[in-house]
Image (cartoon, rainbow, N blue to C red):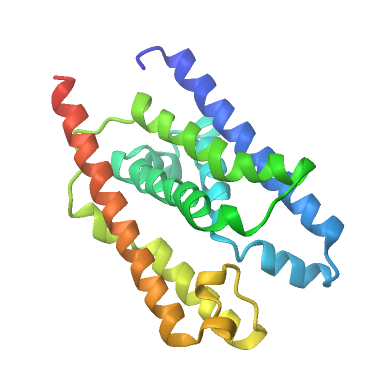
Amino acid sequence: MNNPIKRKWLVVLVAAVAWFAVILQLYLMLLHTKNPIGETLLRFFSYYTILTNVLVAVYCTVLLLKPSGRLGRFFLKPASATAITVYITIVGLVYNLVLRHLWNPAGWQWMVDELLHVGVPLLFILYWLMVIPKSGLRYKNAGAWLIYPAVYAVCIFVRGAGSGFYPYPFVDVVSLGYPRALLNSALLAGGFLLVSVLFVALGRLLSRGGR
């Protein structure tokens, strides 16, 4: 996408949808929770979906408000943008392949679920396809991109050991035990690596095709 005005409006759209979905999900959670506000907020930010949608929203907001700043320059690197694309793609894949059948939300909850798990991932993938330069992507980047999900996994296991709360059923140590929960985490890490490699391969292919 060579038109800078169209690029900007795509970033505005992604930012608006991501912030709207996250804020609406927080409102719905606070509205229906029986836990104290502090515990509710901790649980809210324990979800990989929420953290990653916030990451997408912050990414787009920084590019709109201060793209020349240190964080903006970091985000503009093809490897950084591709890493975020991998993270939000995993949100969509895990929900739609593993979690969607576990419940049947309705009303506002249905809408926010679709935005968080389908709308934002698809919009950000579109942004990556149309805007991000891909010539600098390397397969070695995929290893570094595992840091974010690895830190997330450590945090939810540490907090879960004390609180008994695990945000997703496939890492619920209370129900599954540590061996199965850790195995599921290892399989998911493999999924992260595979998706990362696929994005690098696609990026390199598109880069060569654009020459």
Q: Nearer the viewer, residue 39 or 109?
A: 109
Q: Give the total of numbered labels.
A: 0
Q: Is residue 34 left or right of residue 105?
A: right
Q: Is residue 191 left or right of residue 208?
A: right
Q: Is residue 163 left or right of residue 172?
A: right
| Quadrant that contains the N terminus | top left
Q: Nearer the viewer, residue 207 or 165?
A: 165
Q: Look at 43% across and 15% down and name the residue there.
A: 4
Specify the quadrant of the image occupied by residue 15.
top right
Q: Is residue 179 left or right of residue 167?
A: left
Q: Nearer the viewer, residue 94 or 11?
A: 94
Give percent across and percent down for residue 118. 54, 40
Q: Look at 56% across and 77% down and name the residue there.
A: 172
Specify the quadrant of the image occupied by residue 31.
bottom right
Give percent across and percent down for residue 44. 68, 62
Q: Look at 48% across and 68% down and name the residue there.
A: 152
Give percent across and percent down for residue 163. 66, 83
Q: Look at 59% across and 81% down and name the residue there.
A: 160
Give percent across and percent down for residue 103. 67, 56
| Quadrant that contains the C terminus | top left
Judge whether residue 74 can be spotted in this image: no
Q: Nearer the viewer, residue 46 or 109?
A: 109
Judge whether residue 39 can be spotted in this image: yes
Q: Residue furthest front?
A: 101
- Rendered view: 195 above or below 173: above
